Amino acid sequence: MAYRNINVYQYLRHEKKFPLIWCAGCGNGIVLGSIIRALHTLGLPKDQVVMVSGIGCSGRTSTYVDVNTLHTTHGRALAFATGVKLARPELTVLVVMGDGDALAIGGNHFIHAARRNIDMTAFVYNNNIYGMTGGQMSPTTPQGKIATTAPFGNIEQSFDVMRLAEAAGATFAARGTVFDTDRLDELVELAIRKNGFSVLEILSPCPTIYGRHNKLGSAVDMLRHLDEDTVSLDEAENIADAIKSGKIPTGVFVDIDRPEFCESYAALVKKAQGK
Amino acid sequence: MEPQLLMGNEACVEGAIVAGITFYAGYPITPSNEIGEIMSRRLPRLGRTFIQMEDEIASMAAVIGASIAGAKAMTATSGPGFSLMQENIGFAAMAEVPCVVVNVMRGGPSTGLPTLPSQGDVQQARWGTHGDHPIIVLTPSSVREAFDLTIKAVNFSEQYRTPVIMLMDEVIGHLREKVVLPQPESIDIINRARPTCPPEWYRPFEDNKSGVPLMAAFGDGYRYHITGLTHDEMGFPTTKPCEVDAAINRLFKKIRQGFDEIMLCETFLTDDATCVIVAYGSVARTAKSVVLQLRTAGKKAGLLKLQTLWPFPRRAIEGLPQSVKELYVPEMNMGQIYREVLRVNQGRRTVRKISKVDGELITPQEMVQVVA
Ligand SMILES: Cc1ncc(C[n+]2csc(CCOP(=O)(O)OP(=O)(O)O)c2C)c(N)n1
Ligand code: SF4
């Protein structure tokens, strides 16, 4: 896949920015690759793209990409992005968040951005843990799993990001993995192309912390688990079947149409001006 | 312009519109509600943006995002909401994002006295967010000043690339007065300095004579990185002591250099005064009547009205005539500006505070009792 590497290179910031801060074997870089390939495939000019990120290992994504990048405060990326998008609706806004970032501290902004249906793509890097702060449990840590603040096993139920996104009003919601990058590339493209609030949850291994605490093996083992533990909605008859199999379904869960916020606001302006 | 009957909160909106605010995000809270409500009517008609966010944290975040995309952006709130905004106000200070936060002060702490006046957020406005940072804080004492200082606040935020806080007390926010607003054409409007160089030459956080870097808007062809992490001239995170030191010191330098321009104060009958009341906000109005009352009674009283609270206008205190032996600082708090006056006074004059925190205004009689 040599041609893909060339594409990626054009979208990275070369001076001073490398090496990446991420651990060897971290899934974050694979997601970054998918995002960049999608930008390239969609032919989006770099000047027209804004990447807003929160705080966490995932939040560092924005540092490396040669677009307009805004690294915000923990949990608030979607709210910052809302301001950017409303001030300049013509820009393509991508929002990169960790699972804790998007769903714990940022949970309120997540549901409201979805409810408003503002045109942006929310990438939720789900590594089931707080990576940056050293392995505390997150709202997506599965029950029974170990975290530094759940040394006896997590007793809390975790969020189903897809159902949460759907209930909150997202017009597009999909789940991919860093194991199946071809499919991930497609999902990223679909999510960005959607005119409305899109959520893309990406299952991504954190071998250094989550993997180590839960004895999940090497980075390669964890990638293998991602393949074994997931099932594509395209393969399963329907979502219920997939869940019954005990595996995590991947694919597109929601793809509906609803008025987009910036467009509704433009219409409201016309009405207010009596046009 | 024709005389109008305006409320402080309304005048604030009018000032913001004249100053060129194109984006407002907010969350309802008494006693600032009118600002958001009027914005929601006025801005769409002007083709500008209003959004009610899910909370004050989001409001502040959206304001910063909009400003980065080139808008002139503001929000308004009161005590509890101001507390929630603090983390992102720090982001705006660190990333040097122009924006204005209006805090119509009510009684605190906590939910406190939602409908009653206070000046309890003066120190929070200075130090509410964590870390060393400069800030500009203005406070009006009349409806006309609410208009004028909102324009100043927007102008300062653009000129110095900093968040500017406007503290109104509830009395000024809800006060209705006859005002004659100036012709918009007669008002100076400042816009942030933008780069004109080729994008590859742009160094987004580079120092210059003013200490204020040129600011490109996202989407204008200057792709760069903005972060709340301590950053180098290119905007990328750094922990190198020399770069960190330079970055933080520049933030202070740019405000320090503008001190004379930022320091807004008015004096009244201070030339021959032996005692001066140092006051701000609605309390300054009471103080003025007290000065006149004391003068009729033969006491040489004067007033120093502070419109800028931070950076603290120490030169205004230091510059009072030699004849002044006593300073009085009436405030609707436990003495938040009194401490500052005491600090800069360095023991030269007698300084006394007149504090009131029961949700009622300080009456002229209460002031006279102490000063006379
Ligand atoms: C207000 C605030 N609270 C806490 C933190 C500390 N903090 C930094 S990153 C993080 C969580 C990171 O986990 P996640 O969002 O899942 O992202 P990851 O690092 O796993 O990519 C926390 C709690 C912070 N920066 N700000
Ligand atoms: S701690 Fe985990 S999530 Fe963070 S960079 Fe390392 S592997 Fe990735």
Image (tube, coloured by chain):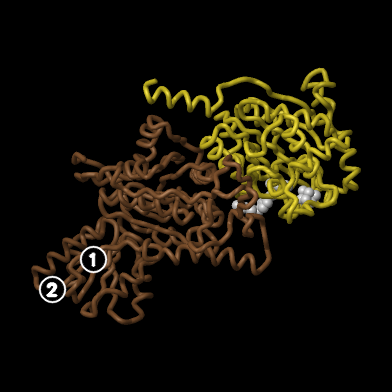
Colour of the chain lettered A: yellow
Q: Which mark is residue B267?
A: 1
Q: Decide if residue A34 is on the left or right side of residue B50.
A: right
Colour brown, chain: B
Q: Is residue B133 placed above or below A174 in the rendered structure?
A: below
Q: Quadrant of residue B23?
A: top left
The residue beneath circle 2 is B299
- Disc 1 or 2, which lies upstream in sequence? 1
Q: Residues within 10 Å of mark 1 (few under 14, many from 20)?
A: some
Front-lying residue, B128 or B302: B302
Select label 1 or label 2 by which is in front.
1
Instruction: Tell me the amino acid under the disc marked 1.
Output: Thr
Query: Which chain is home to disc 2?
Result: B
* Residue at figure coordinates x 19%, y 62% from the top left: B288
Q: Position of residue A94 (x, y in %)?
A: 65, 37
Residue B122 appears left or right of B287: right
Subunit bearing disc 1:
B
